[in-house]
Image: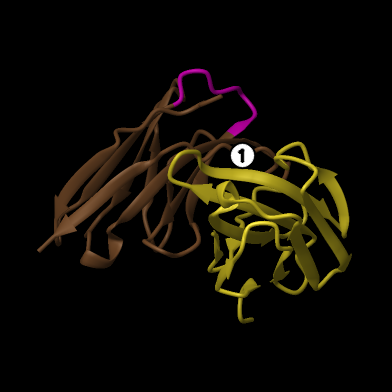
Chain colours: A brown, B yellow
Amino acid sequence: DAKTTQPPSMDCAEGRAANLPCNHSTISGNEYVYWYRQIHSQGPQYIIHGLKNNETNEMASLIITEDRKSSTLILPHATLRDTAVYYCIVKIGGSTLGRLYFGRGTQLTVWP
Amino acid sequence: DAGVIQSPRHEVTEMGQEVTLRCKPISGHDYLFWYRQTMMRGLELLIYFNNNVPIDDSGMPEDRFSAKMPNASFSTLKIQPSEPRDSAVYFCASSLAPGNTEAFFGQGTRLTVV
């Protein structure tokens, strides 16, 4: 069963910020929000995860709303190499990926 | 570390033949996962291991599929007999012990059954 809802596609100009939304209205208190991406013909790649605080790493920022029902992944300066399918996933903290549901994700296209 | 290594990268086989996919996880990772990706169903978890022991195989589609992990550095996914509907990209992933850790995926094996 899908626990997250994402738009099927988005596009973004190179150099601009890409903001990818995700709805997870049924998220439980102990579930984390994870983001992965999959560049064409490659395996999925971890980007970032968080519980309730905003998180930032060298790849992206994750903004989680106060009620935790939605989040936004921000790629601050998108490049052509960021063109990929982005998956938003909820996962119980402290466990393995287990029965992780990847869903269909959002196809982000970065154009020159 | 070279990351998760899968072989072969591409496999074409005839219906009814046995197919074996191989995976070498990242050294030190206690968890290993096998996923299958198709256009119709997206990315599905087939089975995962903890310390070489299968923990959850409920995603394995049918008895034609089997997976083993004889040691911490090697796992196989076998399909016998193969069918055209098994055509997909099969990914192996590994991760550290439980916690909020990321999973590392291999490059995948593209299987075509004709």
Secondary structure mostly seen in magenta is: loop
Q: Is residue B79 above or below residue A79?
A: above
Q: Nearer the viewer, residue B91 or A70?
A: B91
Residue A46 x, y percent position in the rendering: 50, 56
Q: Secondary structure at mark 1?
A: loop
Report the side of B105 relative to A108 (left or right). right
User: At x 21% / y 42%, what residue is drawn?
Assistant: A10
Q: In this rendering, does residue A81 appear at all? A: yes
Q: Nearer the viewer, residue A89 or B71?
A: B71
Which quarter of the image is occupied by the N terminus of chain A?
A: top right
User: At x 48% / y 37%, what residue is drawn?
Assistant: A53
Q: Nearer the viewer, residue B67 or A29?
A: B67
Residue A31, by quadrant, is top right
Q: Is residue A3 above or below residue B1?
A: above
User: At x 46% / y 28%, what residue is drawn?
Assistant: A4
Q: Nearer the viewer, residue A17 or A85?
A: A85
